[in-house]
Image: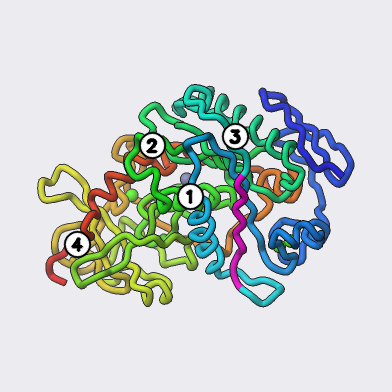
């Protein structure tokens, strides 16, 4: 039985989908409802697949949530697959989701696919216009389809596809983007990830950066956004790798005045209290999940540096007063401050209510072609400017080199 999806990748408006042995014509963007078979563990992969011998032999289980990713890569762009697998498996395994087998978390499976020849021209793009994005999208989807055809053990109804390309922006900064093979304007949720690891960008050979970027992009495939329910970035009350400040890893307090970035990635495990930028109470500060506080993780805020010209990272502790407005004192009453420093160039709303989200409670397992195309809600595109950018992340890391200090000298 073939489950390979046949997609006209060059702008065709309809796709042929082979599902359960029956070919169905399905218009993109208006997916027909397809009822999927029994799925005991709710990971979007049917029991019928998960009970098969080869699937079980590969480590899958119909009573435990599984996440499968296959990565093709160009020669010279291979990742440290073993470390990627072990780092990411740790992150997904600690997820607070329940399973019928009584164990928590998601089992992560990374399958190394084909090595393609290094082609810095073909696999390079500059994602500034829709046309440039569509060009890359089409090429990635062509590769994706070939990959599933070439390897009969890789099934597009449950594998997320990932391709390590050369570069996606001329400055080489953009590190990853999520895509949906069933919707050119999608990616949240989705089934495909393009990663760019241009060796010219410092630290892009480091597994921590690659694992962080991969988990961030897979987060989009699983329906997650930069701000939880929205794309508002750099929230202080949202402890998620989906937030730009934490894509390279969470920060841990190492002394009363210093904090350092750690190789620890997670989606948010709880929903924190709202922070209203028009009515901030510095003495109340920011709350966080007790287990993260117990592990020593701290919050990150940005305040002007000593020259007053640039923003710099500083740390604060949860459940304690926070000097939101960077004025070196804990103000009484409430204050108004643009704590995520957004809207400066676009003139958007500087002061908004920052809502948090429990990512793990909102994961969508059946994005894109996972569980059969059309199984999930239609996807939306991730904003490119919000994707992990190697150059910007390096700036952040420079600021945190040697450990972040507190902004407020009083505490
Ligand atoms: Ca299942
Ligand atoms: Ca499973
Ligand atoms: Ca203050
Ligand atoms: Ca703001
Ligand atoms: Zn993103």
Q: Nearer the viewer, residue 281 or 311?
A: 311
Which of the marked residues, 4 or 3, is nearer the chain's N terminus?
Answer: 3
Q: Is residue 319 visible?
A: yes
Report if the CB atoms under discs 1 and 4 are less than 8 Å apart: no
Q: Which residue is found at the position 18% from the left and 68% from the top?
A: 257
How far is mark 1 from mark 4, CA to CA? 32 Å
Looking at the rendered image, the quarter that the N terminus falls into is: top right
Label 4, label 3: how far apart the Cα atoms are: 41 Å
Name the mark nearer the viewer: 4 or 3. 4
Quick check: 48 left or right of 235? right
Badge 3 or badge 1: first in the primary sequence: 1
Numbered mark located on residue 80 in the image: 1
Q: Quadrant of residue 185?
A: top right
Front label number (3 vs 1): 1
Q: Is residue 8 above or below residue 37?
A: above
* Secondary-structure class at tag 3: loop
Q: Is residue 109 magenta?
A: yes
Is there a contact, CB below 8 Å, between mark 2 and mark 1?
A: no
Visual colour scheme: rainbow
Crowding at label 3, few (<14), some or many (≥20) Cα neighbours within 10 Å? some
Image quadrant in which the C terminus is located: bottom left
The magenta-colored residue range is: 104-112
Instruction: Identify the residue at image location x=30%, y=59%.
Output: 300
Whether label 3 touches label 2, CB < 8 Å? no
Asked whether the residues under the numbered discs 4 and 2 touch, taking CB atoms below 8 Å apart as contact, a structural biologist would say: no
- SS of the residue under disc 4: strand
Mark 2 Cα-neighbour bin, 10 Å: few <14, some 14–19, many ≥20: some
Q: Residue at x 41, y 67 (%)?
A: 273
In this rendering, which labeled residue sits more in front, label 1 or label 4?
A: 1
């Amino acid at each position: 039985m073939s489950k390979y999806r046949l997609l006209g990748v060059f702008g065709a408006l309809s796709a042929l989908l082979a599902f359960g042995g029956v070919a169905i014509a399905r218009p993109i963007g208006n997916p027909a409802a397809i009822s999927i078979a029994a799925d005991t563990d709710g990971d979007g992969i049917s029991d019928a697949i998960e009970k098969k011998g080869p699937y079980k032999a590969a480590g899958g289980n119909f009573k435990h949530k599984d996440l499968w990713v296959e990565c093709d890569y160009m020669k010279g762009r291979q990742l440290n697959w073993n470390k990627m697998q072990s780092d990411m498996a740790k992150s997904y395994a600690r997820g607070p989701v329940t399973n019928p087998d009584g164990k928590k978390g998601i089992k992560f499976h990374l399958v190394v696919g084909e090595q393609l020849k290094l082609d810095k021209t073909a696999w390079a793009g500059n994602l500034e216009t829709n046309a440039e994005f569509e060009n890359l999208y089409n090429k990635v989807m062509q590769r994706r389809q070939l990959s599933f055809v070439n390897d009969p053990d890789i099934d597009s109804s449950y594998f997320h596809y990932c391709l390590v390309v050369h570069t996606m922006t001329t400055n080489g900064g953009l590190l990853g983007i999520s895509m949906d093979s069933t919707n050119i304007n999608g990616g949240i949720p989705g089934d495909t990830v393009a990663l760019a690891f241009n060796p010219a960008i410092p630290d892009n050979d480091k597994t921590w950066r690659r694992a962080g970027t991969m988990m961030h992009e897979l987060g989009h495939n699983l329906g997650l956004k930069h701000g939880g329910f929205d794309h508002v970035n750099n929230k202080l009350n949202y402890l998620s790798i989906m937030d730009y400040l934490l894509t390279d890893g969470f920060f841990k307090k190492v002394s009363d005045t210093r904090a350092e970035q750690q190789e620890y990635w997670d989606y948010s495990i709880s929903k924190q209290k709202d922070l209203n930028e028009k009515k901030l109470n510095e003495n109340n500060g920011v709350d966080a999940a007790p287990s993260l506080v117990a592990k020593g993780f701290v919050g990150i805020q940005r305040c002007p540096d000593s020259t007053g010209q640039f923003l710099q990272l500083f740390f604060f502790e949860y459940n304690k007063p926070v000097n939101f407005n960077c004025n070196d004192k804990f103000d009484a009453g409430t204050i108004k401050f643009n704590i995520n420093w957004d809207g400066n160039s676009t003139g958007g709303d500087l002061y908004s209510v920052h809502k948090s989200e429990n990512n793990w409670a909102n994961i969508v397992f059946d994005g894109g072609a996972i569980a059969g195309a059309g199984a999930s809600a239609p996807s939306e595109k991730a904003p490119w400017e919000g994707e992990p950018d190697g150059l910007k992340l390096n700036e952040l890391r420079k600021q945190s080199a040697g450990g972040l200090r507190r902004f407020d000298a009083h505490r």
